Image: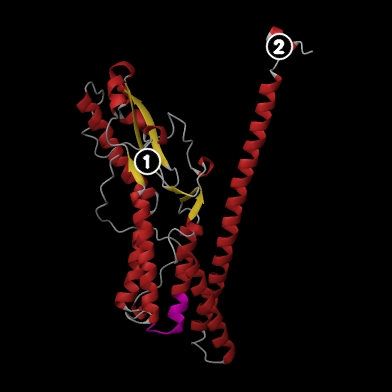
Amino acid sequence: MSKSGGSGSGTDPLLAALQRIDARLKRIENEQVAEFKLSRKSTLELLQGRSGTAMWNAQEYMALGRSQDTFSLNKMAIANFESQASAQTLVQNIDGAFWQRPNNPLYLATNPTSYYDSWMPHMPDDRAPVSDGLTWDYRWALPAVLHIISARVTVLKALGDRSFDAGTAGGNEITRYVKFIEQVRQRITAGLRALTYVRPEVLDMYPTTGRAPVAVGDIYTGRGLAAVVYTPHWTKDWFQPRLPWPVPSYRITASPRNAQELTTNVEVVGSFWWSVLYASTGIPELERYEGELRGLVKRGGDRRSSPSCRTPIAARRRPRPAPQRL
């Protein structure tokens, strides 16, 4: 007979077994997540490798003056096929397999249960749609598709000076890529959510707790910003350098005492943080890339350089969309 049950000093054998099972299942789940990421990365790298080789062959073809010998023409035919096939694999469907992941919190860039560090507990209604256990996520496919489209542009440019003319096969193909990138950008932007008002239960408890959350998040990746701010902490010194301080900040009340002052503070921070998340997600650069592609068709490929395989650093300054309210 066990002697540990009466004293209370020993470990419950059933509880210990459950803990071991839980740890084992957690380890299996982590391994599955790692396996998914590795598989997705390997497949996308294979597509990028093919398109990269095609781009290199196209650049060599142009450097040699578009030689018409059989060997060069065969290499370009292969480059044309490989680059187009790689691009079509990723842009056929925005909800295709490469743009999906399992709906598992381990894939999120935040701990969804952390009250003080995550935006998710404060915005419980803002979640990515789920279908058949899968949800949309752009983190793996988007960098690959930009690289592959850029390679495809180089190949088309090598095939002829009028490859991008409106109405031609090449021009129509680039237009499809533009529309796809625009669709991706719009979905990413729509998934950026900001807490721009004080939830009723928080407002009711504020006289007692003296605290209110501020938050902004990306429903698809889990990226975001969050903080629980107490009454005396609505100052630049408390926010920085860990958290962005709103600019301009003249509407911030240092120690809000009523619902209007508190709501204004939360709204100002939420709106500003939304713009920070918008920029850090790379949407301005994606918009510029989209414009570069569109410009190829409008102006002709012989008067415009091909988009870089890297995301452009500079971004056009233009009004940003207003943050979405909960």
Residue furthest to the top: 7
Nearer the camera: disc 2 or disc 1: 2
- Residue 202, position as x, y percentages in the image: 31, 25
Determine the secondary structure under disc 1: loop
Q: Which residues are magenta?
A: 154-163
Label 2 sits on residue:
5
Q: CA distance from mark 2 to mark 1?
A: 46 Å
In this view, the residue in front, 145 or 200, is 200
Residue type beneath disc 1: Asp
Q: Is residue 128 left or right of residue 257?
A: right
> How many residues crowd around disc 1 within 10 Å: few (fewer than 14), some, or many (20 or more)?
many
Residue contact between numbered discs 2 and 1, judged by CB atoms under 8 Å: no
Residue visible at 70% across and 8% down in the picture? 6
Vertical placement of residue 320 versus 53, above or below: above
In this view, the residue in front, 316 or 134, is 134
In this view, the residue in front, 239 or 4, is 4
Q: Main secondary structure of the magenta part?
A: helix
Residue type beneath disc 2: Gly
Disc assigned to residue 63: none
Label 1 sits on residue:
126
Quarter placement of the N terminus: top right
Determine the secondary structure under disc 2: helix
Q: How many marks?
A: 2
